[in-house]
Image: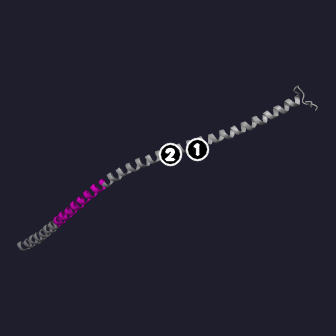
Amino acid sequence: MKKQKNTMPNYVTKEILKKELSKWEKRLNTKIEGGDQRLDAKIDGVEERLDAKIDAKVDSAVQSTKDYTNSRFTQLDTKVDGLAQKMETRFDKFDHYFEELVGMVGQQNKKIDTSLERLENHEERITKLEIHSV
């Protein structure tokens, strides 16, 4: 048997170099694209975890603020209710005192009316006496 001759040249031609470089370029591009996809996936995962942590902290802060505000308003409502009760009892006392004053003024008016009637009676008597004495 005859040996086959190797048809490949032992030197590197420009075309062979271009083919090899394009193969390497394709392999590198494939690796880079795969790496980009993996990095994008990792970045997305990190973003999701950070978003979840931030949301949890924001929710916690919001709930804490709500609880604090509610407790402060509860205290304020309690104080306002206490003040309203005090004012109500004082107004009731003032109403009672006012009613007593109205009664006292009514009694004084009756006394004044009685005094005016007596005065008129005395005036009539005086005029009658003056008429009789002349």
Colour basis:
one colour
Q: Of helix, strand and loop, which one carries label 2?
A: helix
Q: Viewed as shown, does residue 63 lie left or right of 31? A: left
Please give the residue where the numbered disc 2 appears in the rendered image: 56
Q: Tell me which secondary structure the magenta stretch mostly adopts.
A: helix
Residue at figure coordinates x 88%, y 28% from the top left: 14
Q: Nearer the viewer, residue 63 or 100?
A: 63
- Where residue 134 appears, as percent x and y from the top left, is 6, 72
Q: Nearer the viewer, residue 89 or 65?
A: 65
Residue at figure coordinates x 72%, y 36% from the top left: 32
Residue 48 is labelled as 1
Instruction: Determine if the magenta segment contains residue 42.
Output: no
In this view, which residue lies farthest toward the right?
2
Q: Nearer the viewer, residue 121 or 11?
A: 11
Q: Is residue 88 above or below residue 122?
A: above
In this view, which residue lies farthest toward the front?
1
Q: Is residue 95 above or below residue 54?
A: below
Mark 2: give few (<14), some (14-19) or many (20+) Cα within 10 Å: few
Q: Viewed as shown, does residue 22 lie left or right of 92? A: right
- Where residue 77 appears, as percent x and y from the top left, is 35, 53
Q: Nearer the viewer, residue 90 or 103?
A: 90
Residue at figure coordinates x 22%, y 63% from the top left: 99
Q: Viewed as shown, does residue 68 lie left or right of 90? A: right
- Where residue 117 appears, as percent x and y from the top left, is 14, 70
Amino acid type, mark 1: Glu
Q: Which residues are magenta?
A: 82-109
Amino acid type, mark 2: Ala
Q: Of helix, strand and loop, which one carries label 1?
A: helix
| Callout 1 touching callout 2 (CB < 8 Å) | no
